[in-house]
Image (cartoon, helix red, strand yellow):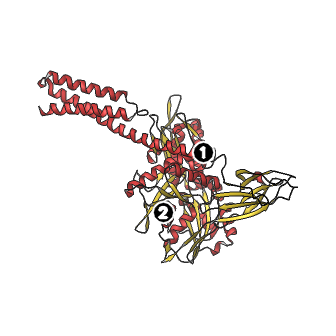
């Protein structure tokens, strides 16, 4: 049985881990680091790049480079490149395929199963989209686990003593806070809250906006229409943000950033930590309400917390750490690596799903997670009637009896909602379906049982049953934002095809380089041989070299086939044989 890997599919960076010798270890990325940038790019010659290679070329290929796609999960966002439409699931699948390949290279065996983490505040559609991305990437997603829960799981194995822990998770694109109790053989999530559109990307944008404004004041040039310049600003903003976590000021020097009337313009600015904190203070303040909500839902005062764990790269910002101290009265724990702990927790869970007991201090542990938002159905007057409250422990199955609103209705539409608002229109509709064949009766007479069944992944199945006729309709919630099974299957085929095409292109690049080198060496050998070489032999070598050069010139990486490569290999081998014969004379 192969290993189950744990994947932290992040907004800015992703990380993959596996349990080896009962310890979770981080699998190195192909670039050599511990994380892989969550970036995908398509070059103009048709090559697909993922990770560090995609991030490095973003300045020169801005419109064909996709980053922070996690923020679009569960939405209708898409991008068209070279006539092909890509949605968040397919782009995320490309990142997952790279992580899968890195894991296979590290382990030396195929990897087909994974536990993937998501923000605790992801709704049902976003969780389904993440699972679909895994399926497209060729992974059986054994479990979807909340990121703060995963971090606490990683922490809990080393610190199994009874305690109440808050996980403050501020990543590249999302913010989550969870209150978790560890003890008595149980890691139990008491409450969770968050914001799916708050993170390091927003901090970067504030720096970018500041640089654009300052540059316009200095040079009277607006950079917002210059794609290449804006990409350089993005890279610089991310770098200066990191530097300001360790220093009081950072110089931003971008020579030849743009030009105006033929004159090159350079950017040279200094951003201080106080100014940076001023730019992002309102964003940091937005984390306060979820923290208070999570504590209230858990029924705890901040003083009852034993530990506060910081997760996500954005928690390295000193102003964020000060805010956490202010909100909790606690010094945040430095016991875990904020970039790696989420992936490690997922790997630990993956190992337990293979039958390896989850233990801490010699005691087996049980993991209990919660649903982040309430589930409701729309009833008369557009009211969202709660069926399952937020922070209910998973898995959960709950039924409630409803009736018809109009006389002699033969069908009812069930509109399933997720959110905390009173009116249906103010919540997220995550799916609708119809129960038909209801026995005709006056309004309020039919008894319709609606059952919500949420699994350990936080994914919902809803069924409705007419208690009189026994007619039943059951669905796993879907919405327009979700891919159909047919679309997923097509995406799987496309991904496999793309993986094969990527390999052909890699082989082609290597073969063309070798062939060009051989042609150059041949030309040099002929020149050195001079008149000592037999005329017929010289003519044959020149003919063989010319044939190979023509094949090299005709080859187009974006359309190259195995047949073309075979022809080039054959021509290369013929020329190599001719040159070898020459050298032996």
Q: Is residue 467 above or below residue 40?
A: below
Residue 323 percent across, percent down from the top left: 61, 63
Q: Residues within 10 Å of mark 2 (few under 14, many from 20)?
A: many
Whether residue 321 is visible, yes or no, is no
Q: Is residue 158 above or below residue 17?
A: below
Q: Secondary structure at mark 2?
A: helix
Q: Is residue 548 left or right of residue 310?
A: left
What residue does disc 1 label? 209
* Residue shown at the point (57%, 65%) measured from the top left: 149
Q: Is residue 172 above or below residue 456?
A: above
Structural distance between the alpha carbons of marks 1 and 2: 39 Å
Question: Foreground mark, 1 or 2?
Answer: 2
Numbered label tally:
2
Quadrant containing the N terminus is: bottom left
Q: Is residue 289 left or right of residue 172?
A: right
Quarter of the rendering containing residue 174: bottom right
Q: Is residue 390 above or below residue 66?
A: below
Observer-nearest of 356 and 31? 356
Residue 270 percent across, percent down from the top left: 52, 48
* Residue shown at the point (28%, 30%) measured from the top left: 571
Observer-nearest of 113 and 531? 113
Q: Residues within 10 Å of mark 1 (few under 14, many from 20)?
A: some
Quadrant containing the C terminus is: top left
Task: Identify the mark nearer the N-term, 1 or 2.
Answer: 1
What residue does disc 2 label? 347
């Amino acid at each position: 049985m192969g290993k189950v890997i744990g994947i932290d599919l992040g907004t800015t960076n992703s990380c993959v881990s596996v349990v080896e010798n009962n310890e979770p270890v981080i699998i190195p990325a192909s670039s050599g680091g511990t994380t892989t940038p969550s970036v995908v790019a398509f070059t103009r010659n048709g090559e697909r790049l993922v990770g560090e290679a995609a991030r490095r070329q973003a300045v020169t290929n801005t419109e064909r480079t996709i980053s922070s796609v996690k923020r679009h999960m569960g939405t209708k966002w898409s991008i068209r490149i070279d006539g092909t439409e890509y949605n968040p699931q397919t782009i995320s699948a490309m990142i997952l395929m790279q992580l899968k390949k890195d894991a296979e290279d590290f382990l030396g065996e195929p990897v087909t199963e994974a536990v993937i983490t998501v923000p605790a505040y992801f709704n049902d559609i976003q969780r389904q989209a993440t699972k679909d991305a895994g399926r497209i990437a060729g992974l059986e997603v054994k479990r979807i686990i909340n990121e703060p829960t995963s971090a606490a799981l990683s922490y809990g194995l080393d610190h199994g003593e009874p305690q109440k822990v808050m996980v403050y998770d501020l990543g590249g694109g999302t913010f989550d806070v969870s209150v978790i109790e560890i003890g008595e053989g149980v890691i139990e999530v008491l409450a969770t809250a968050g914001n799916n559109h708050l993170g390091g990307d927003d901090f970067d944008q504030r720096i970018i906006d500041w640089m654009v404004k300052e540059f316009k004041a200095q040079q009277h040039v607006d950079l917002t229409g210059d794609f290449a310049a804006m990409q350089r600003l993005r890279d610089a903003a991310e770098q200066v943000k990191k530097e300001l976590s360790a220093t009081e000021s950072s110089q931003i020097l971008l020579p030849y950033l743009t030009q105006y009337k033929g004159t090159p313009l350079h950017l040279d600015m200094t951003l201080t930590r106080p100014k940076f904190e001023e730019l992002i203070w309102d964003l940091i303040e937005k984390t306060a309400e979820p923290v208070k909500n999570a504590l209230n839902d858990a029924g705890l005062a901040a003083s009852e917390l034993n530990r506060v764990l910081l997760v996500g790269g954005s928690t390295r910002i000193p102003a964020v750490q000060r805010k956490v101290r202010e909100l909790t009265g606690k010094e945040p724990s430095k016991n875990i690596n904020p970039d790696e702990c989420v992936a490690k927790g997922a790997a630990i869970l993956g190992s337990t799903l293979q039958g390896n007991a989850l233990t801490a201090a010699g005691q087996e542990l049980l993991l209990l997670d919660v649903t982040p938002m309430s589930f409701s159905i729309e009833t008369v007057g557009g009211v969202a009637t709660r069926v399952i409250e937020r922070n209910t422990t998973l898995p959960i199955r709950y039924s409630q009896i409803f009736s018809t609103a109009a006389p002699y209705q033969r069908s009812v539409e069930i509109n399933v909602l997720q959110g905390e608002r009173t009116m249906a229109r103010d919540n997220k509709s995550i799916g609708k379906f119809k129960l038909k064949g209801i026995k005709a009766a006056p309004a309020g007479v039919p008894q319709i049982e609606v059952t919500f069944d949420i699994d350990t992944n936080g994914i919902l199945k809803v069924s409705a049953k007419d208690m009189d006729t026994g007619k039943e309709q059951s669905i796993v919630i879907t919405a327009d934002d979700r891919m159909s099974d047919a679309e997923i299957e097509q995406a799987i085929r496309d991904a496999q095809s793309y993986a094969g095409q990527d390999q052909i292109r890699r082989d082609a690049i290597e073969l063309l380089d070798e062939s060009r080198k051989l042609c150059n060496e041949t030309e040099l050998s002929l020149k050195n041989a001079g008149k000592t070489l037999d005329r017929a032999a010289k003519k044959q070598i020149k003919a063989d070299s010319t044939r190979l050069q023509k094949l090299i010139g005709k080859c187009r990486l974006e359309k190259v086939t195995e047949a073309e490569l075979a022809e080039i290999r054959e021509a290369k081998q013929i020329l190599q044989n001719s040159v070898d014969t020459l050298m032996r004379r």
